[in-house]
Amino acid sequence: MPGPRVVVAMSGGVDSSVAAALLIEQGYEVIGMMLRLWAEDVTAEGQACDTHNRCCTPDQLRDARRVADLLGIPFYVLDTREVFRQQIVQRFIDGYASGLTPNPCLACNRHIRFTHLLNHALALDAEYLATGHYARLQRADDGRIELLKGIDESKDQSYVLSVLRQEQLRHALFPVGGYHKTEVRDLAQRFGLPVASKHDSQDLCFLADGNYRRFLRQYAPDAVRPGPIMTTAGDILGQHTGLPDYTIGQRKGLGISYAEPLYVLAKDTARNALIVGTIAELGQTALAARDVNWISGEPPAEPLRAEVKIRYKARPAAATVTPLPGDRVHVRFDAPLRDIAPGQGAVFYDGDRCLGGGIIEQALDES
């Protein structure tokens, strides 16, 4: 008798391909499914037109189908272009237009993979949806599913999975989370998969050229207008090229002269102003976050100590996390951080265990 049915989100890359092979080896009944995602049509003068999302190019589709054929599993392509455009691309544009620095991977995992794709998997009577993410799951004593970091710290993707709820995690599998990347490539060779040496996929897959600044100028020109570069005291030092061109904590490329180095402190969308200051003004000791998801399904009753990541590749920082009404939290860091960017995710950890996370609403100076 076949084991439980599982849909594997296949991208044509090595991680999802090995995930499918491992599940077959473990006795699951595997179905491969690839998402067809929205991509821009670049028509600006001097640029080649590219209507293929970099996660689902014809080459990626060909590789995914070859792997599925080699493994002897059914393979389907799910047209997700419109929901992806609305839920991910438009949110990305709106976020930057509001002065935020959004992370589209958080929204993609919440709305596309583990809502839209998961619903299709369940409609096929599958018990699970598997992906090639580097993360692990374990069942706690009370029956709840816990999300853990991947064994390979350099590839850990629990940060972008912090948006998942218990009802999604109960149907999730992350087969490669217990391996290092080098081991996954070795497994691909052992399984005879033709994708063993492929490069890793890139973020911002819907950009034709990877240039989000050019993308925003084409799709949200009103959000990329020149304006003043100002100190916190209101002195104008120069002109910026558009708020989305800058990140919190940035020092180089400001195009201004001053007695000491200046850093980007904030983006004032009301005045279309870039606020800069010295390194002494840069560090922030706290943040407020909204839309907080607790992996356990409910917030802790009391403030808790945790390590908090404020970006996907940021080093965890020790902090006290205080739950607030309305799916919000207050995070107070032990030491100031210099690059807290509204719109990014703040994700909380207890060792390897991901407790949850939310979207940074504002940085706070409570020194």
Image (cartoon, rainbow, N blue to C red):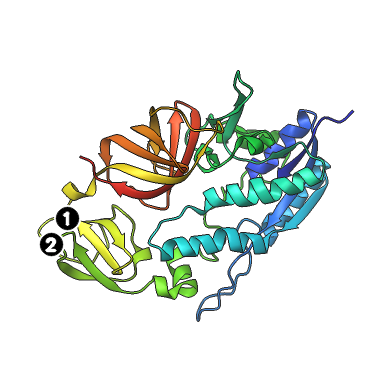
* Secondary structure beneath label 1: loop
Which one is in front, 250 or 109? 109
**Position of the N terminus by quadrant:** top right
**Position of the C terminus by quadrant:** top left
- Residue beneath disc 2: 258
> Residue 208 lies in what quarter of the image?
bottom right
Q: Furthest residue to the right?
A: 1
- Is the C-beta separation of discs 1 and 2 under 8 Å? yes
- Residue beneath disc 1: 261
Callout 2 amino acid: Tyr
Residue 59 versus residue 340 in the image, above or below: below
Residue 313 position in % (x across, y down): 42, 43
Residue 114 position in % (x across, y down): 65, 45
Q: How packed is label 2: few (under 14 Cα within 10 Å), some, or many (20 or more)? A: few
Residue 286 position in % (x across, y down): 30, 41
Which one is in front, 306 or 105? 306
> Residue 61 lies in what quarter of the image?
bottom right
Residue drawn at x 17%, y 53% is: 278
